[in-house]
Image (spheres, helix red, strand yellow):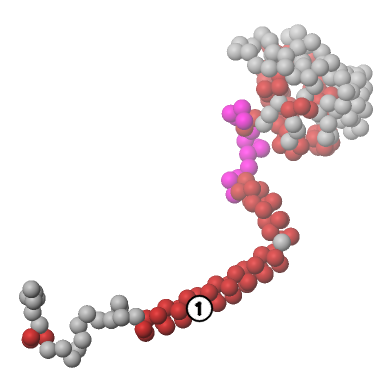
Amino acid sequence: SFQELPSSADVEFCLSLTQYESGSMDKMANYSFRNTLEGFADPQTAISNPAQSGLHNALHIYMNGSMSQVQGSANDPIFVLHHAFVDSIFERWLRRHRPMLEVYPAANAPIGHNRENYMVPFIPLYRNGEFFKSSRDLGYDYEYLQEPALQSFQDFLTPYLQQARQIWAWLVGAAVFGGIVTAVLTGLIRACQKKKGGTSSEIQPLLIESEDYNNVTYQSNF
């Protein structure tokens, strides 16, 4: 049974749970995001309560008819909409907590639900663990979860800006020191070039103004 339909507060609490699975993958798991989202744990405490349905399970029971029966619920058009939204909640949790694949149980789950088990009867065959990733990595996204490109760029820069704030004094000092060194070296190089230019005969003009250009010929003396 269920007391009421899920609220946005219930969803937010579920999303705050950091553990995907806290024990064996069953109805008795406490503080498990998976079990709370599925509806076997209280959406306000995350404590297992199979006698009361919440979140995902609550809507199935509320819709009644074939939707309330496990064997026939997929025949109801609402089923697709409902599970698409549940999947989007899972997507929000993945983006918020960014779990490692190892978080998904590799053993002791119900038959067919371990990480390396194949999802049947789907063809081509895929393992459960292959879908423990963001929907964007699978080629689709949810419109209400899409992030503006600018926001994504800001998110990319944020960690680098935070590091820069921590070492900004060193960066300024290095820039000033580098500027001084560059100025000194530039001055020394120019001074050396000027001194060398006053004594070298190799860079003197080929023709001197006092020469008599009328007597100059290109004929060899040999």
> What is the residue that sits farthest to the bottom in this orientation?
210
Whether residue 148 is in magenta: the answer is: yes
Mark 1 — residue? Answer: 188
Q: Where does residue 132 sit, x and y in percent of width and height?
A: 71, 26
Pointer 1: residues within 10 angstroms few (<14), some, or many (20+)?
few
Q: Residue at x 79, y 14 (%)?
A: 68
**Left or right of 204 in this view: 128:** right
Q: Where does residue 96 sit, x and y in percent of width and height?
A: 74, 38
Q: Quadrant of residue 117?
A: top right
Q: Quadrant of residue 173?
A: bottom right
Q: Nearer the viewer, residue 75 or 168?
A: 168
Instruction: Tell me the magenta residue range.
Output: 137-150
Q: Where does residue 89 sit, x and y in percent of width and height?
A: 74, 31
Q: Where does residue 144 sit, x and y in percent of width and height?
A: 65, 37
The N terminus sits in image quarter: top right
* Residue type, mark 1 in image: Leu
Q: Nearer the viewer, residue 204 or 23?
A: 204
Q: Nearer the viewer, residue 55 or 126?
A: 126
Q: Residue at x 60, y 13 (%)?
A: 124
Whether residue 180 is in magenta: the answer is: no
Q: Residue at x 67, y 56 (%)?
A: 161
**Left or right of 190 in this view: 75:** right
